[in-house]
Amino acid sequence: MSGAPSAVSEARAGRAAPLPRAVTRGESPTSAQAVKVDWLNATFPAPELSVEGFIAFLGKLLGRHCSGHEGRGLFGFSTGVKLFAYLAGTMVHIGSLAMGGESQRGRWMFQLTGKGCGLVTDWESLHELLESLGAKVTRVDLACDFLEGEYTVDDAVRMHGEGGFTSAGRPPSTEVAGDWLDRLRGRTLYIGKGTNGKMLRVYEKGIQLGDFNSPWVRYEVQLGARDREIPLDVLLKPTQYFAGCYPCLAGLVAEAAAKIPTRQTEARTTLSHLLTHLKRSYGKLLHVLGKSEDFDSTELVEEVRVIGVPRRLNPSGVVAGVAWADVQALFSRRNQQ
């Protein structure tokens, strides 16, 4: 079938690929997903496309300029390339490429961190690229957020006691971390083990981000390729695969938060937390400067402003957009407590 070359074929040739195809047949399969992909590791045979071609195609998927910088090897791969995406005037680390090493037999590894996954808007095209490369998913994290605490850590404890995580008659192992006594710093429940290929983390996400009164809880499944094959379709149907990991999870997803509200909540919570630290550390300094003759708050902001994105802030929140009024409201509420 003739016609214009696809984005994948142009990437294979090492050229900057055009924008991935627009989704014109209705909403993307992942647009209404209650569960999001929050980490991805995949390996594939050494491809025909160059590193530059792969990075260029990734940039089209993210809708922004991407670049690679030499880094260390990972997981037995001898060399690596750190991947960065351009956002808000700076480069944000979003993942890695790795290759080389006798034990790897010429394979490459592609890693997309939580920050990188949050910037992907076209999972279909990423799926198409990895499928064309014969990729094998070696790790994927699937996150399900309950912004209003519809399901909590205590609910997960209860479901475990009721056998909700038991498969083939054997209950999985459990482990806890965090502040289970005073409940001031957040709790985490681990069900299963990552080394065995399947683990569920249930943790108080809002508290982790610094809002100690937040009801936000995240249920996150980590799947590994040990003793199982992870289908590439997990990128297109994360909710379906999440629900199938443990017997009790299918009933949770109907109440999970949508992707955009989750990103906005995370950004709002993080920014209000950082703003609280700014007040505690430098509030008195700002007060003294405000009493200075000819003080101009606009000039002060421009004097101290640094172009970039705070390391703690997920770049997907910046893309989703956060209103100053929302950040200010959360900041005010926290400082009145």
Image: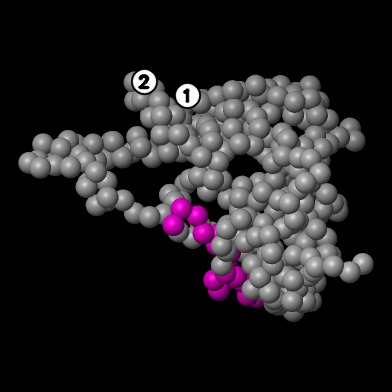
- Residue 329 appears left or right of 195: left
Residue 89 in the image: above or below residue 101 = above
Other residues around mark 1 within 10 Å, as few (<14) / some (14–19) / many (≥20): few
Question: Residue 297 in magenta?
Answer: no
Q: Residue at x 83, y 64 (%)?
A: 132
Which mark is on residue 213?
Answer: 1
Which corner quadrant of the image does residue 97 belong to? bottom right
Q: How many discs appear? A: 2
- Foreground residue among 173 and 95: 95
Q: Which residues are magenta?
A: 68-89
Indicate whether 194 appears above or below 35: below
Residue 293 position within the rendered picture, expressed as x and y whole percent measured from the top left: 7, 41
Nearest the viewer among 311 and 189 is: 311
* Residue found 48% across the figure and 37% down from its top: 322
Based on the picture, tell me whether residue 70 belongs to the magenta stretch. Answer: yes
User: Residue flagged by tag 1: what amino acid is it?
Assistant: Asn
Label 1 near label 2: C-beta < 8 Å? yes
Is residue 141 placed above or below 266 in the rendered structure?
A: below
Disc assigned to residue 35: none
Q: Which quarter of the rendering shows the C terminus?
A: top left
Q: Which residue is mark 2?
A: 337
